[in-house]
Amino acid sequence: MNFDAFLKTLPIMGKGMLGIFIVTCVIILIMVLLNKGTNKK
Amino acid sequence: MRALYENLLQIQWQQVVMWMIGGVLIYLAIKKEMEPSLLLPIGFGAILVNLPLSGAVTQVYNGVEEVGIVDILFKAGIANELFPLLLFIGIGAMIDFGPLLSNPKLMLFGAAAQFGIFFTFSVAALFGFQINDAASIAIIGAADGPTSIFVANYLHSKYLGAILVAAYSYMALVPIVQPPVIRMVTTKKERLIRMPYRPKEISKTTKILFPIIITMVAGFVSPRSVALIGFLMFGNLIRECFVLDSLSETAQKVLANLVTLLLGITIATKMQAKYFLTPQTLLIMCLGLVAFVFDTIGGVMFAKFLNLFLKEKINPMIGAAGISAFPMSARVIHKMGLKEDNQNFLLMHSIGVNVSGQISSVIAGGLILSLLA
């Protein structure tokens, strides 16, 4: 068991989850804009 | 005469164990139809490379090194990430993003269901794996073979064989792994929530622009992994443009089948007893299960969290489809919904979440590479 390594990975875990939600929100925004933009036409 | 049986004397018990493992994989592929296109070549390859002094892998005969064909294939197709990327063109061509585009918020479940990856990353580090190996093991939770190969290979993990066997085995075991976990974290009342499907018409322009824009976004966020999402989206663009039907069909069938065939047998080079039969392999199999379980829990719990604020409740089971494992996970959720209530059709919602999981797992792989850079 390497508790130090575990603690070191926690910030990466946090950044990873935060990162994936940020990217996801950007993609959702793009999808909404795409849908709105192309529906008008 | 001696030449006929001399090689038999070279057999080691570890090789016999690997033949048995290969036999089990072939049995699961044929008899249980579990990911047969991959488990069968991997199982056969495990036997092939573990024959004493097998010429399929690199050996030294009388002081001269002779490079084996499986090692040549590995260098040509996996060491440079070519096979997983080519396979992604085929997968991209198979995916219809329509259900996701008609309900974009489903994408959130794909993100939440990547929790298992990051959780397992920390757990693997706790168990003493080096950071690159921990990240490679965690990516088993992507439930996506090509991404697992790409990340593990990119990070030079020495456990590639075990990681791949775990990834593909658990993908095949989604119908067994997910239902008990989902039942454990949901109530009967939640599983009975009906979700009417209101499809929206998605324009052709949206379907064409979507893969291009997603590739650009992924490229800005994680340039190292842009090839991964780029090839997936390239396959999808071929499908959606409607002027390359024959290419789309080739990518979906011929290309995907051909690469899968070579991929399975090539992975076998990492299934030589000396690499595979280690206590770490067993631990990796357990950690792979942890990744799948916590991905499922992550998706379901996020749906339950959203339900606290929503008027029209979401059936939390669909969150579990964010695990990727396309399209098996979506089917599992749909069947679970029907089992609870034979008028509850969750398929289109779970397909939407499932394809979002496909994108999210690739993004998660890219983020891991970026964060470890």
Image (cartoon, coloured by chain):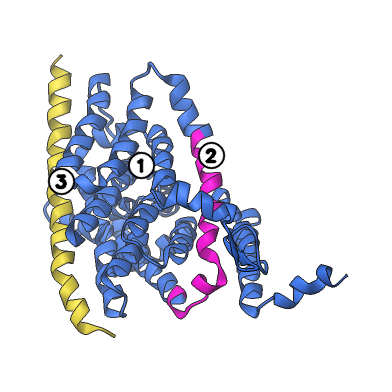
Chain colours: A yellow, B blue
- Horizontal arrangement in the rendering, residue B159 relative to residue B151 (left or right): right
Farthest-out residue, top:
A41
Mark 1 or mark 3, which has the lower sequence index? 3
Residue type for callout 2: Asn
Residue B283 % position (x, y): 41, 76
Mark 2 — residue? B257
Q: Which mark is residue B221?
A: 3
Q: Secondary structure at mark 1?
A: helix
Disc 1/disc 3 C-alpha distance (Å): 26 Å
Mark 2 crowd level (few <14, some 14–19, many ≥20, 10 Å Cα)? some
> Between residues B53 and B204, which one lies in front from this camera angle?
B53
| Chain of the residue under label 1 | B
Disc 2/disc 1 C-alpha distance (Å): 23 Å
Residue at 43 percent of width and 36 percent of height: B90
Residue at 46 percent of width and 47 percent of height: B77
| Chain of the residue under label 2 | B
Can residue B332 be seen in the rendering of this structure? no
- Horizontal arrangement in the rendering, residue B248 relative to residue B189 (left or right): right
> Between residues B170 and B185, which one lies in front from this camera angle?
B170
- The quarter of the displayed image where residue B120 is located: bottom left
Mark 1 — residue? B351
| Quadrant housing the C terminus of chain B | bottom left
- Number of numbered markers: 3
> Between residues B241 and B146, which one lies in front from this camera angle?
B146
- The quarter of the displayed image where residue B29 is located: bottom right
- Horizontal arrangement in the rendering, residue B287 relative to residue B165 (left or right): left
Mark 2 or mark 1, which has the lower sequence index? 2
